[in-house]
Image (cartoon, helix red, strand yellow):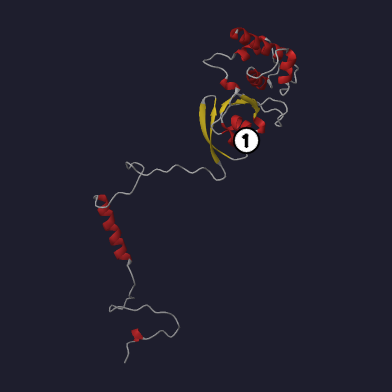
Amino acid sequence: MRNNRERAPTNGSLAMPENESGRPRSHGASRRSFLQKMGAMGLASASGALPKLWSAETPNSPMTAPSPPAGTIPVSLRINGTSYPLNLEPRAILLDVLREQLDLPGTKKGCDHGQCGACTILVNGRRIKSCLTLAVMHDCDEITTIEGLEQNEKLHPMQTAFLDCDAFQCGACTSGQIMSAVALLKEPIGQGDGAVREAMSGNICRCGAYKGICEAIQRVRGNASAKAS
């Protein structure tokens, strides 16, 4: 007569085969054997029998540079002689990066449409309006802002002339006026006041300090011409 343990179940379920002790026969590792193996591994690791896992303190361990955030481009902006490695969105405006990310608020945001000139800076020696250009376009360019004109705690001659000639009132446009005037010193324009006004027409002063601005520029141009001769 067959043993009842070998009978197939009548309820349609799958029965676990039993061993001689009447307990279900398990397939694979039991809980006890698993714990025994883990305990043995812990002892071996403590005694140094197992190799140590890699950690930051391991010499010659492989180090990978973190990848830039999604949707950004790695850019190096060289501003006033200092390089700033950044990860920027392709649409980031240079003016906003200067003011909001690099803490260089001397470049002013006026109209934000390239009409007032308050955001004028120098890129590779040429004046541009930073509200109209993307920051990623100036990777490794030499950028100069109003903060970079002072050298060794000494004002640029144009800054000194603006002070001496009272070439500003509220100051909102002053940094852009000065940056544009510095670039003008190396541009081929006429010597008269009319030529200066024409060259500075992209910088608007709502206070109407144009007379002092023109006088300051001509004073520096005259000193430069005298030194050259």
Q: Quadrant of residue 134?
A: top right
Residue 186 in sight from this viewpoint: yes
Residue at the (29%, 65%) spot, across then down: 33
Residue at the (28%, 56%) spot, across then down: 41
| Amino acid residing under circle 1 | Leu
Which residue is at the front of the view, 33 or 45? 45
Asked whether, in this view, residue 149 is left or right of residue 61, the answer is right
Which residue is at the front of the view, 61 or 184? 184
Q: Looking at the figure, which quarter contains the N terminus?
A: bottom left
Which residue is at the front of the view, 200 or 96? 200
Residue 226 vertical position relative to residue 109 in the rendered view, above or below: above
Q: Residues within 10 Å of mark 1 (few under 14, many from 20)?
A: some
Q: Secondary structure at mark 1?
A: loop
Residue 31 position, x and y percent, is 33, 65
Q: Looking at the figure, which quarter contains the C terminus?
A: top right
Residue 209 in sight from this viewpoint: no
Residue 149 vertical position relative to residue 45 in the rendered view, above or below: above
Residue 111 position, x and y percent, is 72, 29
Q: Which residue is mark 1?
A: 134
Q: Quadrant of residue 221?
A: top right
Asked whether, in this view, residue 209 is left or right of residue 42, the answer is right
